[in-house]
């Protein structure tokens, strides 16, 4: 995922921040809304994506499906988190969820780790971004990814804390999860640097860039700080926050980051309500409130529709990394449009990458922050686009009503794939909205609590713990 942050192409210049300041009272709790049974259906369909697509022998979840693809190691982390949810929702029995989890963890622990270019799943406890299914070896000459390893480890620790039973399967899940987390050499990834490096390859060694600013890697720093075996220095958190951009966008003041997944991924596992680091204490908010404001700004962007794309509205929005119709350009409604394939789409105060492609996960994975606007958005997308977008496994990854060709017809382009890293957050955040389930389980994990404290977080549930 490093390319989504580092290699950002600008299709549009800085976007108007709109006018008219909004009321910005911090929301320390999820707004009270009546539970909508649509969320039950959406979550069940989305959970079934992982239950059906995950390789039963290795436990590796594919990057995308039904198109053939290697596994995304981050998607495995989301898939692992979904097993406990599926058990709690009654989609699978708890013993089956535990056995499936154990299959995945055993495979991850036993797969080869070494520094040669081929034949390994990772090195020094970290994992390659993409690995072949079912072999579990490096695919596409990809990088050893620090952030994707962290998203995997978040799922690993979720299973460690959830499966607390005394039987042999759940006991083994806890032991292997602990081994996987403890062997990740975070210290190596930050050695001689102010922060954690983006990645490493056998051919070129470390990337030049380190993770900083506000993005999807927040949970990586928390897990690296909490490691009992290979921790990084607490100074990395100051480096991480040093380039935050605090700005007003469409009437909302918050830490800017264009792709919505940067405001969502870390929140899948960590409840930031009521806990603050030095930066958020000075701003008078917490990171939950920051994501709520980012979500509202996305809705305002959709309503304003500065790019004048087809289909955008107050209830149809969500610009975030996703699939796209492809790299081409042609004239639509009198304007030449440039379209792209998979890309790190996003809109923010300081940059925008928007080609008219929307992803339902933009609203779906924010449902715990602002259900009062996200649920209507999801239902509007379902109602307006029907079976082309809303299917047996939830929403396909993306759609673009502006991409009108003889092949697509007047409705525009619809993806035929689902992406694991977009499906997982929808299912997880629906459960967090329902009862805070994943958040509550992760609060029990001492590694997560230690990481937060070493980053300077205080307050709320963290102090009570």
Image: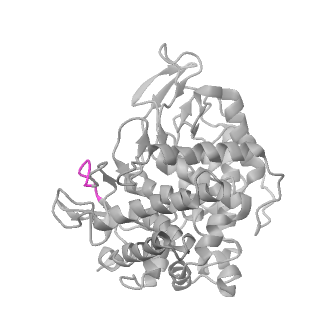
Q: Residue at x 74, y 52 (%)?
A: 371
Colour convention of the picture: one colour
| Viewer-nearest residue: 461 or 25 | 461
Vertical placement of 293 versus 417: above or below? below
Q: Is residue 138 magenta?
A: yes
Is residue 377 something one can see in this rendering?
yes
Which image quadrant: the N terminus? Answer: bottom left
Which residue is depicted at the point 52% across and 48% down? 422
Quadrant (top left/top right/bottom left/bottom right) for the C terminus = bottom right
Q: Position of residue 462 (x, y in %)?
A: 65, 82
Q: Residue furthest front?
A: 167
Q: Does residue 248 appear anywhere in the picture? A: no
Q: In this view, does 26 lie to the left or right of 345?
A: right
| Identity of the residue drawn at 46% across and 38% down | 323
The part of the image, by quadrant, that contains residue 236 is bottom left
Q: Main secondary structure of the magenta part?
A: loop
119 shown above or below 283: above
Does residue 117 sit above or below 222 in this rendering? above
Is residue 156 a member of the stretch shown in magenta? no
Which one is in front, 245 or 55? 55
Residue 19 is situated, as x and y percent measured from the top left of the image, at: 74, 48
Q: Identify the residue at horizontal 67%, vertical 54% (top origin).
A: 430
Instruction: Please state the extent of the stretch shown in magenta in the rendering.
Output: 137-143
* Residue 460 horizontal/vertical position (percent): 71, 80
Is 380 left or right of 320, judged from the image as shown?
right
């Amino acid at each position: 995922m490093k390319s989504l942050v580092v290699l950002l192409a600008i299709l549009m210049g800085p976007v108007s921040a709109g006018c008219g300041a909004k009321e910005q009272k911090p929301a320390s709790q999820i707004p009270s809304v009546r539970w909508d049974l649509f969320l039950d259906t959406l979550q069940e369909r989305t959970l079934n994506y992982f239950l059906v697509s995950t390789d039963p022998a290795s436990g590796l979840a594919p990057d995308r499906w039904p198109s053939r693809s290697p596994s995304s190691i981050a998607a495995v982390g989301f898939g692992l988190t979904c097993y406990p949810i599926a058990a709690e929702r009654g989609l699978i029995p708890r013993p089956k969820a535990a056995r499936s989890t154990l299959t995945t963890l055993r495979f991850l622990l036993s797969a080869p780790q070494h520094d040669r270019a081929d034949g390994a799943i990772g090195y020094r406890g970290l994992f390659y971004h993409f690995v072949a299914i079912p072999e579990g070896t490096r695919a596409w000459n990809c990088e050893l990814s620090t952030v994707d390893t962290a998203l995997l480890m978040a799922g690993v620790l979720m299973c460690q804390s959830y499966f607390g039973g005394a039987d042999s399967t759940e006991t083994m899940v806890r032991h292997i999860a602990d081994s996987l987390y403890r062997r990740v050499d975070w210290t190596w990834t930050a050695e001689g640097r102010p922060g954690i490096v983006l990645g490493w390859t056998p051919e070129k060694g470390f990337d030049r860039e380190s993770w900083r600013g506000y993005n999807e890697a927040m949970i990586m720093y928390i897990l690296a700080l909490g490691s009992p075996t290979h921790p990084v220095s607490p100074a990395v958190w100051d480096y991480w926050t040093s380039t935050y951009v605090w700005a007003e966008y469409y009437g909302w003041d918050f830490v800017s980051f264009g792709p919505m997944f940067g405001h969502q991924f870390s929140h899948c596992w960590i409840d930031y309500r009521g806990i603050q680091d030095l930066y958020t204490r000075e701003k008078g908010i917490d990171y939950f409130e920051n994501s709520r404001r980012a979500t509202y700004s996305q809705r305002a962007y959709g309503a304003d529709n500065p790019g004048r794309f087809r289909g955008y509205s107050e209830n149809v929005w969500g610009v975030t990394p996703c699939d796209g119709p492809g790299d081409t350009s042609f004239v639509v409604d009198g304007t030449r449009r440039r379209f792209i394939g998979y890309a790190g789409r996003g809109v923010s105060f300081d940059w925008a990458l928007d080609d008219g492609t929307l992803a339902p996960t933009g609203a779906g994975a924010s449902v715990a922050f602002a259900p009062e606007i996200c649920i209507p958005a999801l239902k509007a997308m379902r109602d307006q686009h029907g079976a082309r977008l809303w299917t047996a496994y939830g929403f396909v990854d993306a759609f673009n009503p502006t991409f009108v060709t003889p092949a697509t017809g007047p409705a525009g382009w619809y993806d035929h794939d689902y992406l694991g890293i977009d499906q997982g957050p929808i299912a997880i955040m629906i459960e967090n909205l329902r009862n805070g389930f994943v958040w509550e389980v992760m609060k029990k994990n001492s590694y997560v609590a230690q990481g937060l404290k070493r980053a300077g977080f205080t307050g709320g549930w963290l102090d009570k713990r």
